[in-house]
Structure formats: structure tokens, C-alpha cells
Amino acid sequence: MTDGPHDPEHDPRASYALEPEYVAALTRRIVASSGRTAEVFSPLNGQPIAHVPQSTPADVAEAFARARRAQESWARTPLAERAAMLLRLHDLVLDRQEEILDLIVWESGKARKHAFDEPGHIALTARYYGRTAEQHLGTRRVPGIVPALTRVETHHVPKGVVGIISPWNYPFTMALCDGLPALLAGNAVVAKPDAQTMLSALFGAQLLEEAGLPADLWQVVAGPGPELGPALVDGADYVCFTGSTATGRIIAQQCAERLIGCSLELGGKNPILVLRDADIEKAAEGAVRGSFSNAGQLCVSMERMYVADQVYDRFVDRFVARTEAMSLGASLGWGVDMGSLISQQQLDAVTAHVDDAVAKGARVRTGGRARPDLGPYFYEPTILEGVTPEMTCFGHETFGPVIALYRFHEESEAVARANDGEYGLNAAIYSQDGNRARALARRIKCGTVNINEAFSATFGSIAAPMGGMRQSGMGRRQGAEGVLRFTETQSVGTQRLIRIAPMLGMSGELYAKVMTANLRLLKKLGRP
Ligand code: NAD
């Protein structure tokens, strides 16, 4: 691994700092009356970034009250106008990209090229929902019980106010991406982004306002999850949570208590399969991106790799070589391949997983150590061999730049091992035979499977629903499911000329006979 280029213009250790007025303009958006602030630091160099005002549970209730008032007229705003707001946001996000990237890198410590995925994902999401609003949310005529005489329409009614709890790892897109379809469907939002990365999320709120979102429809609160979580669930008509499986379970219980819906985007222990006919260079390149994007702090990143015996040695040599060629560094510029972990807590967790594996006999092919010389929380991209079930990193999510390699002989064995464990978020398969790989994909118990790509083929295709099977989540973001979850479907039926009951002195028995003949006829006619 090499150290990233020293870039004085964009070196946070030199002179970069956020202007206090800039930070204040962003944090003013938080509904917070406690008078308390929390200091946040940049993982790039440990320097303080901002004092973030902290909300109380009463502030959360106030945020819901404001959002609820604003939502009433938003729900009556024509769908085309709501969609146009998203398309304006699309342009703004692309135009203001550099500012967004600076904030993300500064707050999260990730490499700029990984930060780019965030405005990219928001632009894709805004365009997709902006352009498919009518397709997903328009009123539909559906067949009635009596052809021609029963007219039935279905409408998608907004749930009301959606609570969004988001994590620190993709602080701009995770704070915003679920909210865009919620707004499109006529809802308001109360968002609680992670405490470590409030500024990126607040900048998203500012861009929504600049895109023409009416006041008060997007409320932001700040503070520790366990303290604000109950008030957030109490005020919401639907909750959208992204984070750990442990917290997801708590949110699900609280939502069940109130009989409101929720979608949970949770953790993973994602497998990548390299089949014997894989293009080795392509697979090695994909394995680097799949395992080390955002230093592995990505829900869909790879932590287990199963490689066919026939290509194992060739593949591993290329994967190790490509990993060792990566440049690491604390920089706001484009020149580094991997940045920092976000916090001491993350560094401790990654170190503990690797140290535990090594103590129990795993071999480090490359990496395996922290790099305090680059910044307080840097850890090298790490490839392990010989990982066994008694090691913590065998089945538990590391959420860091660590991947374990395993050999396999038969593809059915690789599928069985990929399906091991309790998670089911994302998987990847490398093979030059698309048909075979797609057939194998259907046997993998994950919400998304990418072929010859680690995660972007599905995650970047917003028409494709994304989410976890098993302990990796409930519900889906993106696609039709991603917007319909924020609506109640209402059916309105109008009956004309005849009633759906015996008429003109007809006996119940005769009515049943007529209806039975009718039912048989309608099936014969191919009616649904
Ligand atoms: P986390 O569950 O600790 O925190 C996520 C969010 O929940 C934060 O905003 C936090 O403040 C809040 N929170 C914490 N406890 C809460 C409580 N009791 N009530 C209400 N809110 C609470 O998760 P994390 O460690 O910050 O994030 C990393 C995890 O997120 C990983 O497991 C990762 O796989 C997962 N993740 C999943 C996806 C996905 O789309 N499936 C995306 C990103 C991250």
C-alpha cells in the first residue's frame, strides 16, 4: 500500500476548515431547544468540525407537529409539481457536487471517489422517482365485480409523516434517498441522521429547500438514537430505518406496539463467488471495490469470498497485488483509493476482528494493521486466509476493510456456504457465462445479487428494489416498493344500475345460481 499524494491545496492537515458561519447556517435547521451541543470531529485529522445543537424528545414532537401541518397542503399539491421538485433537486445535486463531496469527506473520512457515489445515488433516485411518479402513484382503474357496471379506482394516499433514522456511513445519501419517494408520495419527513455526520444530512435538507420544497416538510432533529428513537417512532405514521440489525429489531418492536409499518435496511455478511470461468482481472478489480469501498463501511460490501480451486492461486495473486497498489491517505482530493474509518469505535471493532482471527490461526495475506501515521482511524485493506467458524469475523459483520478468502470445489458447495449464516443482503458472482451465473444467483438467499460487479449494478439501478432477506432487513428501498411503502392504497368502488344482491323478488337460491353461472362464464372469458 502506498501513501496518498500530498495535496497541499486539499490537505486537511494544512488549512482546510469549515467557516463557523457556514456550519451555523446548516445547524440552524435542527429543531433543538435543549441548549446543549455535541462537538463532532473530522476523522481525517481529529480536528473539531462543529458544535451540533441537540434535540430533546419534546423537540421531536414539535418537529412532527410542524411537519404534520405542512403535509396537509403538500398532499393536495399535484403529483407533477412534487415530481418537478425532485428533478430540480437532481440538477442542484450535480451542480453543487464539489461542496457536497467536501462535506462528506471532511465528516466521514472516506476517499473522495467513494464519496462521489452519494450525490450520484441521489441524482439517480431523484431522476427515477421524478420520471416515474405517475406510473407508481397515479390513480388506476381496476376490473370491477360486475363488468361495465362496477367501476373501481385505486388511489395511493400518503401515510402522513415519515420518520427516517439514518447511519453515518453514507451520510448524504442515506439521510436523503428514502425521503425522496416519501415526499413524492405526499408525505412530510422528520429525519434523525447519525450524530457523527449531521452536516452532510443538513446540506441535503438545504438543497431540498433550494429545489422548492415548501417550508417545514423536511424536519431535522439531532441527538443520540436511544434518547430520541422512542419519540420518533411515537410521532411517525411510518418509520424508515437504516443501520444495524440490533437497532432495527428495537425499532420493529416499537413500531409493532403502535401498529405502524416500517422498513429496515440492516447489516450483512456479504459473499462474493469467483467461478472457475471468471475473468480474473475483472474479478480482482471488482473484489477491491467490493471489499474496500468506503474502507468496507458499506452495508453491501463484501466480507467473504469463495474462489474456485482451479483459479484460486491466480486470482489471489492478482487480488493481493491490486490491494497492495492502493493508495491510502487523508485527503479531500481525488488522489487516494481508500480513506479512513469513521471513529475510534470502528477502528477498535476492526482491530478486534483481525486480532482475534490471527490469534486463532488465520493468515494475513496483506494489511492487518492500523495506520496512525495517516490519521487517527486508518486501517489497511486486509485479506485473510484460514478463517474458521470459531473466529468472530467468520459470521459477524466486521463493517471494515477486511475480507476472508475460502476455496471451493463444487459450485453447489459455494452456494451453500454463501447461504450460511443469518444475513441475506447482497452477493456477487464473477463468471464469463452470464446464463450460468444468473441461474446460480436465483439460488442465493440475498435481496440483491450482482454479476461481474460487486454492488453497483443493483444499487445504482433505482428501478430495482433493494433490501435484505432474513436478518438483513424488511421491506425494500428503490423501485415500486420503495415508494408504495409510504402510501396507503385506497379503493373506491361505484356500482351502477344493478345492485350486488338479489333483485326484483329473486330468491337467494336463484341469485346464487345466477352468480355461479356468471363466475363460470367470467373465468371462461379469461377475466382476471
Ligand atoms: P446503528 O444501528 O448503531 O445506528 C444507525 C442509526 O440508528 C443512527 O442514526 C443511530 O443514532 C440510530 N439509533 C441507534 N440506536 C437507536 C435506538 N435505540 N433507537 C432509535 N435510533 C437509534 O448502526 P451504525 O453502526 O451506525 O451503522 C452501521 C450499520 O448499518 C451496519 O450494520 C450496516 O450494515 C448497516 N447499514 C445498512 C444499510 C442498508 O441499506 N441495508 C445501509 C447502511 C448501513
Image: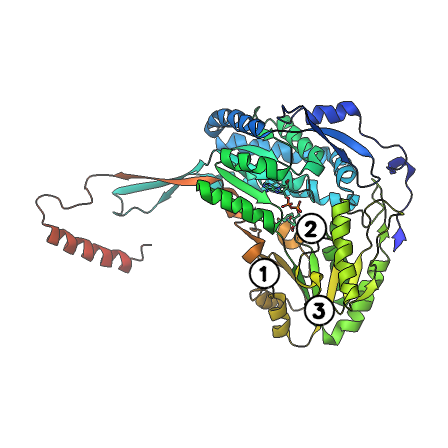
Q: Amino acid at mark 3?
A: Thr
Crowdedness of circle 1 by 10 Å Cα count: few (<14), some, many (20+)? some
Q: Is residue 446 left or right of residue 108?
A: left
Q: Residue at x 60, y 26 (%)?
A: 212
Q: Nearer the viewer, residue 46 or 312?
A: 46
Q: Amino acid at mark 2?
A: Leu
Instruction: For the N terminus, give its image quadrant.
Output: bottom right
- Residue 150 spot, x, y in % from top left: 27, 43
Q: Is residue 371 visible?
A: yes
SS of the residue under disc 3: loop
Label 2, label 1: how far apart the Cα atoms are: 18 Å
**Residue 20 to residue 153: above or below:** above
Is the C-beta of the residue carrying label 2 under 8 Å from the nearest atom of ligand 1?
yes
SS of the residue under disc 2: loop
Picture quadrant where residue 522 is located: bottom left
Crowdedness of circle 2 by 10 Å Cα count: few (<14), some, many (20+)? some
Q: Nearer the viewer, residue 103 or 133?
A: 103
Q: Amino acid at mark 1?
A: Glu
**Residue 114 to residue 453: above or below:** above
Label 3, label 1: how far apart the Cα atoms are: 17 Å
Residue closest to the far left: 505
Disc on res. 422:
1
Give the number of the mark in front: 3 or 2: 3
- Residue on which the image places disc 3: 388
Q: Is residue 130 visible?
A: no
Label 3, label 2: how far apart the Cα atoms are: 23 Å
- Residue 197 spot, x, y in % from top left: 71, 37
SS of the residue under disc 1: loop
Split into quadrants, the picture shows ligand 1 in the one at top right
Q: Nearer the viewer, residue 128 or 40?
A: 40
- Residue on which the image places disc 2: 298
